Amino acid sequence: MPTHAAHPATGPTHSHCPYCALQCGMTLTPNAAGAGVTVAGRADFPVNRGALCGKGQSAAQVLSAGARLTTPLVRSAAGRLEPAGWDEALEAVAAGLARTRAAHGADACAVFGGGGLTNEKAYALGKFARTVLGTSQIDYNGRFCMSSAAAAGLRAFGLDRGLPFPLEDIPRTGCVVLVGSNPAETMPPALRYFAELKANGGTLIVVDPRRTRTADLADLHLAPRPGTDLALALGMLHLVVAEGRVDEEYVRERTAGWEPARSAAMAHWPEYVERVTGVPLPHLREAVRLFTAAGHAMVLTARGPEQQSKGTDTVGAWINLALATGRPGRPLSGYGCLTGQGNGQGGREHGQKADQLPGYRKLTDPAARAHVAEVWGVPPASLPGPGRSAYELLDALGDDVHALLVMGSNPVVSAPRAAHIEGRLRALGFLAVADVVLSETAELADVVLPVTQWAEETGTTTNLEGRVLLRRRALAPPPGVRSDLDVLRDLTARLAPEREKGFPTDPQEVFDELRRASAGGPADYAGISYARLERDEALHWPCPEPGHPGTPRLFLDRFATEDGRARFVPVTHRPAAEEPDAQYPLHLTTGRVVAQYQSGAQTRRVAELNKAAPGPFVELHPRLAARLGIAEGETVTVTSRRGEASAPARLTPAIRQDTVFMPFHWPGRGRANTLTNPALDPTSGMPEFKVCAVRLERAQPRD
């Protein structure tokens, strides 16, 4: 079998960006004398059509030896991380895991993965956890991304895929309601789709408590209080019913459960919704008119409504609005979720989530367990059951979880109640981290393993459209750096040598096994091969057979439920887990800035990105600043019930007067996630990143 890991390209290589879920097409051209690669956008790739944001343009800088890890590190008796050989480092990891398992049982060992891992690595990591360690304790940082939308999509449609239609459909629809998303900052090449929508005569409605650069493009901007998106959606559905705008034929022919959902919505009178959300009733009515008057229309959600303790119900309410107006499963219409992380879609489809097996199969389904166990060559009964969701797993560290292997994640910065999670990581008996850079989490580890990154390895990712893509290796990694697949094979050789053959290091071989494991599952990749991907970048799952064209548009004939009907789910508004009070009178909401990405572990190592976004800040309204006596640029302290963070004030009328905003890319005193609330959605396990109660004051009183 040909190996895609052995030799780097000598000329230009078609690849894809390592950052967000657009997975923009790019060409990597080796520089003279082997000094890295030059990045250029690919005009022939339909998602970005040649455009790249600053992160994509500068992505190659993280490939340089000065920006990343190039040798394993092992903590010495003196407590310092010291350079070590690979054998020493791998022996230390294997010994730490074996020692923990022998003393406390398999579930005392845990695995925490990342939404940036390729499909092959995500698949192998899940297999390693369940067949080598024998642990149920595996989850990944994608739980913090779109798990609420996934849960709501499964509940309504029987299947979760970020977008059930290609991005190219957006400019051709009539109206888009964009809820809690700011693609101008989070995925800039996607903003053109919304600009083209407007140029074509369509309408854009943006729901966001801040007037972002994306909201500036909108025909109508609704700015609800943080945590009230659920009430807003229910208020809009109430008006749809009251004004006779329901698509009765569609509801009758293609859905089930309408009456309970309708009754729940009718309890949310528009005047009540206006009081709860702060959105004026005329704006609410105008949003309903614009959305229902369009011949085609879409609702798109992102982290805003999803990262709440009621995120699944909130997304469900927006899905109910789309269903009542006859949108999902029709051309140029529907509901979709703008997935955030680079491989957030594929990462959860193939085994990193606590409750899922490859192919998006349920771990509790006996038939699914039997199928995957056969591919893996193990008895079905040997597969552990579902484990904890991400925050619950991190919260258990040092308690009944004593050893942790982290691959491609930085929870010290990205987890809610981050100071507490940092303490949990420090309480572990053993911590190993495999990463590209020495992240804040890796700094706490007993062993750090330097691994390859996007341009140094071949592998597949799945973008927000369900489009499966081949990222090709363009250059060799620095000496001393190995692939995650090598790491998992070498650990298996030490922990369970009889299973070593089940962990090949050639990504194509791993992908071929993934195809077999996913066959017949909801996310069926059986018909997708490296050979097809080499010549075709339009393969969307499900793709069950080699001759199948893939499925760019889902649900056109039926939904993925038993009877083919979409399900309305009755939901009711409830407050956030933590509302402002006399002690903490303001809302805090968090998000991203265009020049940084996620925990910033990689982008904070790029000089030009740091120049554009050098550090954290606290965004607040000038009237709130005047009331508190805060000046532009002055260092302020934001305090919640979980801790405090300090950063310079940034005054802008683009935010509500009862709300402050912080980006979450930085560690230390400006770490926004020190403040955030780990209250979990009961269905998805999503923490409430998007709203908590805080107070704001000057860091130092003036004389």
Image (spheres, helix red, strand yellow):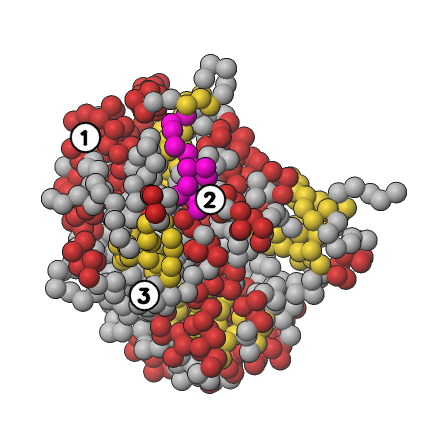
Q: Quadrant of the N terminus?
A: top left
- Residue, x 40% and y 29% (percent of image)? 448
Q: Mark 1 or mark 2, which is nearer the start of the sequence?
A: 1
Range of magenta residues: 61-73
Work out whether residue 52 can be spotted. yes
Mark 3 lies on residue = 45
Residue closer to the observer: 206 or 293: 206
Circles 1 and 3 in contact, beta carbons < 8 Å: no
Q: Position of residue 638 (x, y in %)?
A: 68, 46
Say which amino acid is labelled 2.
Gln
Kindly indicate the quadrant of the structure image that contains residue 269.
Answer: bottom right
Q: Above or below — where is 88 with respect to 174?
A: above
What's the distance in space between the residues labelled 2 and 3, CA to CA? 25 Å
Residue at x 33%, y 43% (from the top left corner) = 34
For disc 2, the marked residue is: 602
Frontmost residue, 62 versus 687: 62
Q: Secondary structure at mark 1?
A: helix
In the rendered image, the quadrant that contains the C terminus is: top right
Q: Percent x, y for residue 501?
A: 16, 33
Q: Along the polypeptide, which appears first: circle 2 or circle 3?
A: 3
Q: Is residue 121 left or right of residue 645?
A: left
Q: CA distance from mark 2 to mark 1?
A: 32 Å
